[in-house]
Image (cartoon, rainbow, N blue to C red):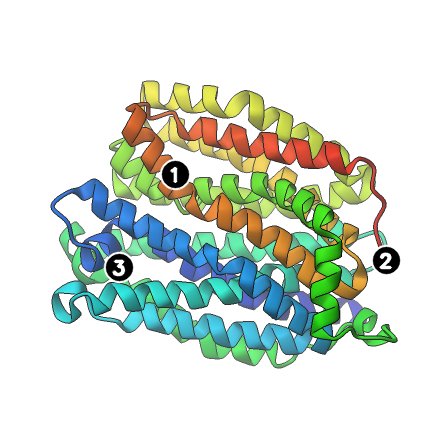
């Protein structure tokens, strides 16, 4: 019982920083329109919204660099030390965006500072997911890696729900004009208040036995060379992640904007749907992570990618034909099931196929490449596709493309066995 409690405490401590990272990312995505008007004012609402979403995506461009640099640091100096460093960088990014005045007060300096804040966050986030996933995989009890690692993504869903609840509360007590003017900053300040508590939690982290048992901890140069030597594995891992990161940011960060600006539903409807999606994700991730421990990773990966490929566009066509809260909720919960089932198997699989000595760096580079090239720009790409085609269901084609990438990665990897050295 004591050992079980220690494991639960370790999961909470390590996943807490992942919560903070996702909390801030979602706040930015949920209030993209308000942030666009504040820092990127324009006579064209589309241009302002696109500028905000491109800034959201810009943070992802730094992820591969952060994955390589910070991933190498973690593989060299330890999981615990690296995760404390990423938390400090994330906190700096949150504070930057929360405190900077708008364009009217600081002129062009304001959007520049916001972009810099996003880049700092992206740099730290590049390895946060990998660092947390690897830590959880290395402390997992035998036969339960899928269940343990699923809580990396599970912490993200808690962030989704907390941000959505804050959004519902703001909508209840503030007018739309007040939210657009200053209310959108409140969740960022809440994030700032959470930072000291998460620092306290993470200070109690212990190093993993697997890392301590390594007889040789490679130097940074060795890690860079090893990651380069496994370039094919990294690229195929990136294909796996594309399905996860595109579907995740569509059903979470983009949903409130999609519901309000594309489907013309109330902002509250989008937030409530997002809250339900976060809860659905939180249920499916550990359940399907545990299922992958029993039936294997590949069956889930293959089934979910095929289902996404076949159903994403038809589901969105059905939704936009007669937009309603009920239809939006139904479509999003279906996509949530596919995302949660796929990701529950994919993340742990990615930790297993990477060589142990460069596990964090290899995982993080694969994940960050997909997030930088595809996932982080999903809101911007979806907005652009709808704008140029006048087809509100076009994001379904983007989801189908992501599913095709995941299917290709799964097939090309074949029945690759986990690598332990």
> Across the whole image, how many numbered discs are drawn on residues?
3
58 lies above or below 93: above
Report how far apart the C-alphas of labels 1 and 3 lie in the structure: 23 Å
Earlier sequence position, callout 3 versus callout 2: 3
Report how far apart the C-alphas of labels 1 and 2 lie in the structure: 38 Å
Identify the secondary structure beneath mark 1.
helix
The quadrant of the rendering that contains the N terminus is bottom right
Identify the secondary structure beneath mark 3.
loop
Crowding at mark 1 (Cα within 10 Å: few <14, some 14-19, many 20+): many
**Picture coordinates of residue 290 (x, y %)?**
74, 46
* Left or right: where 183 falls relative to 296: left
The residue where tag 3 is placed is 184
Crowding at mark 3 (Cα within 10 Å: few <14, some 14-19, many 20+): many
Q: Could you tell me if the residues under marks 3 and 2 are in contact, i.e. CB atoms within 8 Å?
A: no
The quadrant of the rendering that contains the C terminus is bottom right
**Picture coordinates of residue 67 (x, y %)?**
59, 62
**Residue 9 seen from this side:** no
**Residue 237 seen from this side:** yes
The residue where tag 2 is placed is 420
């Amino acid at each position: 019982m004591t050992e079980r409690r220690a494991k639960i405490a370790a999961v909470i401590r390590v996943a807490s920083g992942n919560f903070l990272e996702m909390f801030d990312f979602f706040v930015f995505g949920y209030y993209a329109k308000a942030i666009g008007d504040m820092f990127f004012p324009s006579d064209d609402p589309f241009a302002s919204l696109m500028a905000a979403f491109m800034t959201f995506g810009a943070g992802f461009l730094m992820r591969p660099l952060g994955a390589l640099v910070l991933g190498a640091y973690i593989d060299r100096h330890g999981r615990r030390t690296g995760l404390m460093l990423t938390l400090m960088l994330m906190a700096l990014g949150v504070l930057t965006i929360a405190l900077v005045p708008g364009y009217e007060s600081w002129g062009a300096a304001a959007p520049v500072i916001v972009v810099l804040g996003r880049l700092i966050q992206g740099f730290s986030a590049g390895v946060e997911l990998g660092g947390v996933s690897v830590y959880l995989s290395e402390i997992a009890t035998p036969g339960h890696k899928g269940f343990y690692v699923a809580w990396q993504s599970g912490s993200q869903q808690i962030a989704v729900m907390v941000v959505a609840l804050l959004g519902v509360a703001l909508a209840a007590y503030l007018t739309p004009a007040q939210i657009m003017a200053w209310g959108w900053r409140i969740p960022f300040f809440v994030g700032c208040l959470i930072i000291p508590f998460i620092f306290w939690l993470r200070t109690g982290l212990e190093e993993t036995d697997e890392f301590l048992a390594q007889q040789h901890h490679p130097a940074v140069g060795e890690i860079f060379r090893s990651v380069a030597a496994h370039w094919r594995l990294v690229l195929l891992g990136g294909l796996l992640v594309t399905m996860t990161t595109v579907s995740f940011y569509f059903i979470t960060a983009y949903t409130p904007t999609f519901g309000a600006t594309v489907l013309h539903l109330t902002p509250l409807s989008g937030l409530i749907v997002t809250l339900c999606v976060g809860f659905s994700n939180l249920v499916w991730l550990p359940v399907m992570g545990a299922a992958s421990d029993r039936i294997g990773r590949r069956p889930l990966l293959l089934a979910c990618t095929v289902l996404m490929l076949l159903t994403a566009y038809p589901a969105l066509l059905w939704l936009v034909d007669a937009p309603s809260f009920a239809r939006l909720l139904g479509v999003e919960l279906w996509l949530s099931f596919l995302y949660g089932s796929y990701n529950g198997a994919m993340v742990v699989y990615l930790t297993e196929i990477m060589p142990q000595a460069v596990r964090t760096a290899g995982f993080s580079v694969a994940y960050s490449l997909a997030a930088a090239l595809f996932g982080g720009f999903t809101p911007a790409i979806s907005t652009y596709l709808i704008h140029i085609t006048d087809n509100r269901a076009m994001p379904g084609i983007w989801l189908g493309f992501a599913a095709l990438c995941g299917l290709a990665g799964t097939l090309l990897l074949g029945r690759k066995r986990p690598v332990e050295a």
